Image (spheres, rainbow, N blue to C red):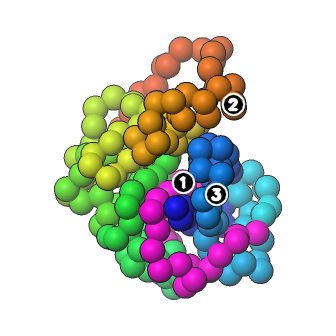
Amino acid sequence: MIIGIPVYQKVDLLDVTAPHEVFKWAWPDAELRLLAASTDKPIETRDGFRFLATHCFGDTKELDILWVPGGDPKALAPIMRGEKPRDLLDFLLRIGPSAGWVCSVCEGALLLAAAGLLDGYQATTHWAFIPCLKEFEKISIVDGFPRFQRDRNRLTGGGISSGLDESLHLVRLLKGDDVAREVQRTIQYYPEPPFPNDLKVPASCPFSW
């Protein structure tokens, strides 16, 4: 089992670390790759956390699971436009069509959309960026604010913390209820947030590319 999480400057920390935690509990022997253009230059997340990627894009020929995190729109825009360097976009274009599962959380769906990997599929994303995803006419946006949405081997998640529910659901699909339940128990994930859902879709996309 090879799981790849492409990372980039100003990526969302929890979009990366939440599924990483879940997947390592579910597949202790899996090869979990944090992928970037270089393993030497630190990746700085949107909130300033720094870490190093474990593998370069060019070192990966195939993946069982491709998991694409979201990030700062200012970082997403040049990637979506295909500006040089095109390392991440070219990686998605190359690896996505053959990956066993193609997943995203938060604005990561916009990167998949830019690579054409959600064309013909139902999908969701962070509530504030639903209007952005609607600009891709070949993608069917599901109603409401689901934590995740599955369409065949595509699994897309809502905003940031949704990656926990989404990654647990993927474990459930691939390893069954017992394993997913045990992982959930291990990480003690039984959320009780202080406030109810009060989300509303913005009138327009909050950034341009």
Which mark lies nearer to you, 3 or 1? Answer: 3
Kindly identify the amino acid type of the residue bearing the numbered disc 2. Thr
Q: Is residue 165 left or right of residue 110?
A: right
Name the quadrant containing residue 89: bottom left
Q: Is residue 54 magenta?
A: yes
Label 2 belongs to which residue? 186
Q: The magenta stretch spans which residues?
A: 52-79
Quote the CA–CA distance across marks 3 and 1: 26 Å
Q: Few, some or many C-alpha atoms within 10 Å of disc 1 (few <14, some 14-19, many ≥20)?
A: many
Q: Position of residue 149 (x, y in %)?
A: 35, 39
Label 1 belongs to which residue? 70
Name the quadrant containing residue 7: bottom right
As displayed, is residue 94 above or below residue 162? below
Kindly identify the amino acid type of the residue bearing the numbered disc 1. Gly
Q: Position of residue 193 (x, y in %)?
A: 63, 18
Quote the CA–CA distance across marks 1 and 2: 26 Å
> Which of the two discs, 1 and 2, labels the residue nearer the N terminus?
1
Labels 3 & 1 near each other (Cβ < 8 A)? no
Which mark lies nearer to you, 1 or 2? Answer: 2
Q: Is residue 57 magenta?
A: yes
Label 3 belongs to which residue? 29
